[in-house]
Image (cartoon, rainbow, N blue to C red):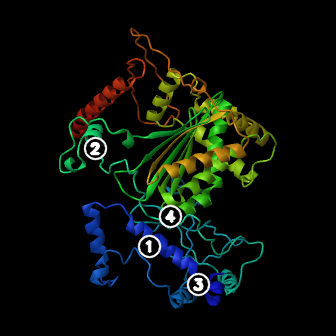
Amino acid sequence: MLRYHSDKGLPPWIFEELKAMQEMSYRYEDEPSPEDFVENMAENMAPAYDLPADRLLDALSLLYEFDPVAVADLLDHYFTPANSRIDLTSTKFGRAADFEDAKTSTTIEVVDAPLTNGLFDPTGIMPLQEPLFGAQYWCQNISNELQQKWTAVSQAQLPPLESNLSLPKQNEFVPTEFELKPLPKTDIDQPLATEEMIDGGDKDDLDESVGFPPIPARLHPSQLPSLLCDTNILKLWHLQDRVFKRPTAELRLLVYCADAGKSPLHSACSDLLVRLISESLNEVVYMASMCDLSTSISSVDSGFSIRVNGFDHKLMTLFGIMLDTLLSFRGEDSSTLPRGIEKERFDLCLESNRRRYVNAGMQASSLASDVRIKCLTPKMWSPNEKLKAISSLDIPTFLKTVSEVLGSIAFECLYHGNVNVSDAEHALSEILRLLQASGGTVGLARNEYPEQLVTKVPSDADITLRCAAKDPKEPNQAVEVYMQVGEDNTFDRVMADLLMELVRLISFRCCKIQS
């Protein structure tokens, strides 16, 4: 297929798109550490690259001119079956323990044994041993018959109609606008400006050379997140960047679900839903990542959390796809999965989650934390409870359960970065539009948000919990000491965090000396 399009002429937009992405990544790349910078410079000065002195910084990061002759030369003389190597790694070939007593050789040897049924078969062949790590492996020639078949199909031709191979589509996430949004006229571009400086002082009195005060003064309201929408359906906060001054932004959305964590089944189905969404959007997320856009979705105690960050120009495009996919499961009481979610994908994700629950707590440290949290929070369902809940899960039950989870919902959102009030209002309307298209909601009052209660430990209690490791071969032990200091409040939390940092610093020094 590549040879066919190379002969006919590759579309120029492919190169221009790659060139734009390289320039974007290079222009807004984070500043490297001095040692990494020096190492990269030394590598770029290697004679093999033959780079001119004025291109040592960017020659290996940017694309310059499209050369179709060089592309054709690579395809015709290098991308050939005779010039290929195939690496296979699988437990079907055995495990390391299977060859502990086997005779091995550290001499590289290529075996001419024929392929069995067209597949690699190491039966009866002495494994080789990699000299540095001691790994066993085999080398086997590809038969002439198979090479001839590959050569025949590698001619300049289009793939069969039933094949999914094709040239890539244009990447919809390539940003083209990198301008910094101007701050409001009533604002001030000074990260350390206080309310008194702005309202009662002269802007020229702000000396950027003055160090950060020991105790930060109160910031001006314009430098704090502003609440643009406050309803039972959506609470949206907005803050325009004044510090980093880059054309990037971040949007975080917390979806409160009244029935989140209602039962082990609801919790397990929420985990499975997140896995399904992530798997089904792999291609979309990959295309976005090529443009330095990243996203994640996770299930939390109160519902779901969506995070999108990167260049602000196309950020809402990716966010809309993520939220629309999540909301597509609302009201799905039938036995048919939403469009784009195949049954095979559902089965794979279900089996993967089952294995994850089985393997949870295999390490002593993670098991100790799980047991402690489970004792303190009765509604925090354990992996074992979730595993039992989905032991015989089918698609209709899954769809009914996630529809219940997503039935009564509310949103809280923070939009921060190179975005002004107009951008935040656009995000507001987009969230409400997608929600209305999925069936709408009356929202949730604050007292209807799901709570995760913590058991109060009696002040005179001295409770010791002992738990055997799940893995009988686990050689490690873990000890956790939990001290409850009272109801959560900001001051106590800050003091506890400060104490934790002090203890960590002291313990690090002790452990460093001991090691």
Residue nearer the viewer, 22 or 312: 312
Q: Quadrant of the C terminus?
A: top left
Which label's residue is closer to the chain start, 4 or 3?
Answer: 3
Disc number lying in front (2 or 4): 2
* Residue located beneath label 4 in the image: 291
Tally the numbered discs.
4
63 vs 391, left or right, is: left
Say which amino acid is labelled 2: Ala
Tag 1's secondary structure? loop
Which label's residue is closer to the chain start, 2 or 1?
Answer: 1
Q: Earlier in the sequence, mark 2 or mark 4?
A: 2
Label 2 to label 4: alpha-carbon separation:
34 Å
Mark 1 or mark 3, which is nearer to you? Answer: 3
Q: Is residue 278 visible?
A: no
Q: Tell which circle, 1 or 3, labels the residue nearer the N-terminal end.
A: 3
- Give how far across and how far down residue 430 sits, in percent: 62, 49
- Mark 2, residue position: 193
Q: Are marks 1 and 3 in contact (CB under 8 Å)?
A: no
Mark 4 Cα shell of 10 Å, populated few (<14), some (14-19), many (≥20): many
- Identify the residue under disc 1: 107
The kind of secondary structure element at disc 4 is loop
Measure the C-alpha gap from mark 2 to mark 3: 63 Å
Q: Residue furthest right?
A: 334
Q: Quadrant of the N terminus?
A: bottom right
Q: Earlier in the sequence, mark 2 or mark 3?
A: 3
Rounded to the nearest angstrom, the CA distance separating label 4 from label 3 is: 31 Å
Q: Are marks 2 and 3 in contact (CB under 8 Å)?
A: no
Residue neighbourhood size for the residue with mark 1, other residues' Cα within 10 Å, grouped as few (<14), some (14–19), many (≥20)? few
User: Under tag 2, what secondary structure?
Assistant: loop
**Residue 189, x across and y down, in percent:** 32, 51
Q: Amino acid at mark 1?
A: Thr
Q: Position of residue 229 (x, y in %)?
A: 55, 38
